[in-house]
Image (cartoon, grey):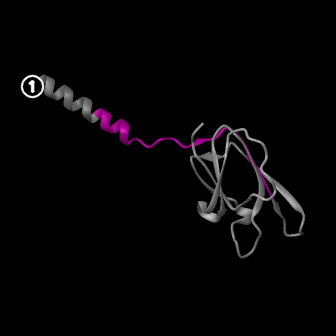
C-alpha cells in the first residue's frame, strides 16, 4: 500500500513538472537588417538578444501594401534563423546560420523565425 502511494506521489510530481510553463528565452547576440525609410534613405535595425524560439514580424516592413521588404539580414546570434518574404513567417524562406556573414542586399524579408537551435 505504501509503495502505491509513493509511486502515485512521484507520478503526480512528474506531471506537475512536465506541465509547468517554460520561461521565455532569447537568442544571444544581434540580428540586423536594412530597410528603405519613408524618406527613401537606407536605414538599419538591430535586434539585441531577440526572443526565441518564435516568429518576429519586422515592424518597419510588416505591411506589404505600404512598404518594400527589408533586405541584407545578418544573423549574429547563437541560433539558426529562418527569414521569410512575408509577415507572420510565411512565404519563401531562407536559413541563416549562427554568427554568419551578412546576406546580400537581394535577400528580402518581412519576418524572421529564431529556431532555438544552436
Between 27 and 22, which is closer to the camera in this rendering? 27
- Answer left or right for 41 relative to 80: right
Measured as percent of width and height from the top left, residue 85 is found at 67, 63
Residue appearing at x 70%, y 59% in the figure: 58
Q: Position of residue 84 (x, y in %)?
A: 65, 59
Q: Nearer the viewer, residue 13 or 78?
A: 78
Query: For residue 106, what is the image quadrant?
Result: bottom right
Q: Residues within 10 Å of mark 1 (few under 14, many from 20)?
A: few
Q: Magenta span covers which residues? A: 13-34
Magenta stretch holds residue 31? yes
Q: Is residue 110 above or below residue 15?
A: below
Image quadrant where one finds the C terminus: top right
Quadrant location of the N terminus?
A: top left
**Residue 40: % across, % down:** 89, 68
Going 71% across and 76% down the picture, which residue do you hit? 65
Residue 6: x %, y % from top left? 20, 26
Q: Is residue 89 left or right of residue 19?
A: right
**Residue at point 60%, 62% (across, down):** 88
Residue for badge 1: 1
On screen, 50 above or below 10? below
Amino acid at each position: 500500500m505504501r509503495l502505491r502511494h509513493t509511486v502515485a506521489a512521484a507520478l503526480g510530481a512528474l506531471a506537475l513538472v512536465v506541465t509547468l510553463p517554460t520561461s521565455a528565452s532569447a537568442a544571444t547576440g544581434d540580428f540586423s537588417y536594412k530597410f528603405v525609410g519613408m524618406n527613401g534613405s537606407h536605414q538599419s535595425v538591430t535586434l539585441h538578444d531577440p526572443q526565441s524560439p518564435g516568429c518576429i514580424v519586422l515592424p518597419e516592413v510588416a505591411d506589404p501594401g505600404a512598404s518594400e521588404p527589408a533586405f541584407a539580414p545578418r544573423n549574429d546570434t547563437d541560433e539558426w534563423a529562418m527569414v521569410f518574404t512575408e509577415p507572420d513567417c510565411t512565404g519563401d524562406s531562407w536559413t541563416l546560420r549562427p554568427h554568419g556573414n551578412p546576406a546580400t542586399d537581394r535577400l528580402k524579408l518581412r519576418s524572421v523565425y529564431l529556431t532555438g537551435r544552436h
